[in-house]
Structures are given as structure tokens and as C-alpha cells.
Amino acid sequence: MNQFRTNNRIIQWRRELEKRVQLPGETVEQYAKDIKRLIKRIDPQNDWEDTQKVYSFTKGLKDDTYRQLAPVLTMQANPTLNVAIEVAQKIEEVSRQTSVTSAPAFAVPASQALPDLTQLINESVKKAVEAAFAERRARYNSNAGQGNQGTRPPFICYRCQKPGHKANACTEPAKAPEKPAGNTQSLLGGNPDTMENVFSNTWSLNY
């Protein structure tokens, strides 16, 4: 696929995406499928923001569908492309049913009245958002499990230096601190005779 992604091809796909609109008689599903195809060609690494994908889809929708879709997406914090497509399909379905029931030959009893459009859209958005969150949660858990596998060493107790527990849960008695090795003479770097000579020379210099 990458060998065909020349700069000219990418420019051509971008122009197609900018000019792409929902054609007469074309369903939202068919239109959305073509929009996804163009976005995938332009952005194979999936680096585009959700807002850019949603705009590429909504800008070419039929006017009546877009007018009903826009306020619904405005109420969402960060609507994804799949959410926008699902809501648009629900609007299209309700509009189709409404146009059928408005015709005298296909009139239906009042007991079979259509459900509220707002309720259908809210339910559709809720399902799509829950599915998106579930997918992201599963992806996060999978990445977290792979990242932590075999990389975290066991706890080492600072009291007994044994693995498997912390110092505040250690049952071993605390060890007394060890005395530093050596003595004052070794620190000063000489034996008693040398030390005596050092102090003697110091006295003679001062007096």
C-alpha cells in the first residue's frame, strides 16, 4: 500500500474527500463507507484527530440529516467518527419511517406511532460511546499488561535483605549498625611514632 502512496496520490485523495458529498439515493452507510476508505488512504497511521474525521464525514451529508445531527454532536464532549455515523444512520432511519407513515396508502394506526427521535438518538449515542470506551479500555489493559510483564523486580526488604516483602512487614529483628572500619590513627595516615613527630614539628614551628 505504501508504494502507491505518492504525493500526487495523496493530493488526489484529499481533493476527493473534500468534494465528496452524499449522492441522491445514497444511504448514510454507503456514504460513510467511502469516507472511511478515503481517510484510511490519506491517514494509514490513524494520526488524524476525531474532530477532523467527523468533519470530513458530516460536511457532505444531506442537509436535513446534518441539521438534526449537528446539535447532537455539539452536546457530546469528543464525538468519534463511528458515533457520528451511527447517529446519522438512526436519523436517516427515522426520517424514512416518517415519510412512509405520512403517505395515505401506508398509514399506520396510532398504536404503532414512531418512537421519539431524540430518545432514539440518545440511545444510539450512548451505545456507541460505551462501545468506544470499552474498546479503549481493553486496548489500555492489553498494553499495560504487556508493558509490566517481567519488568518489575520483587520487593527487597531493607531490614533482612530478602525478597518478597517490605521492611514494615519484616519479622526479622533489626540489625545493629556496623562500626566503621579502621581507627583515628589509620584515618590520619600514620603510626604512633609518626604522629608524635607530626605534633613535635608543629609545636616547634609555633614557638
Image (spheres, rainbow, N blue to C red):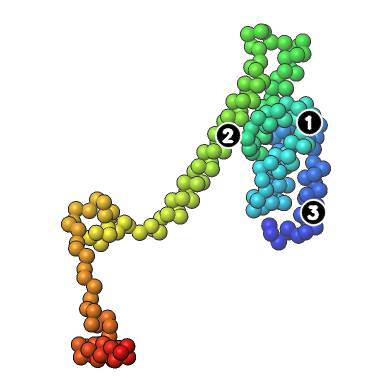
**Disc on the earlier residue, 1 or 3:** 3
Q: Is residue 165 visible?
A: no
Disc 1 secondary structure class: loop
Q: Which quadrant of the structure image shows residue 131?
A: top right
Disc 2 secondary structure class: helix
Q: Which residue is mark 3?
A: 11
Q: Residue 44, position in %: x, y?
A: 66, 52
How packed is label 2: few (under 14 Cα within 10 Å), some, or many (20 or more)? some
Q: Which quadrant of the structure image shows residue 90?
A: top right
Q: Nearer the viewer, mark 2 or mark 3?
A: 2
At x 72%, y 22%, the residue is: 95
On the picture, is 84 further left or further right than 155?
A: right
The front one of 30 and 168 is: 168
At x 66%, y 46%, the residue is: 49
Distance, label 2 to label 3, CA atoms, is 33 Å
Disc 3 secondary structure class: helix
Q: Which residue is mark 2?
A: 129
Distance, label 1 to label 3, CA atoms, is 25 Å
Q: Which residue is mark 1?
A: 62
Compared with residue 48, is residue 93 higher up or lower down, i.e. above or below?
A: above
On the picture, is 53 further left or further right than 181?
A: right
How packed is label 3: few (under 14 Cα within 10 Å), some, or many (20 or more)? few
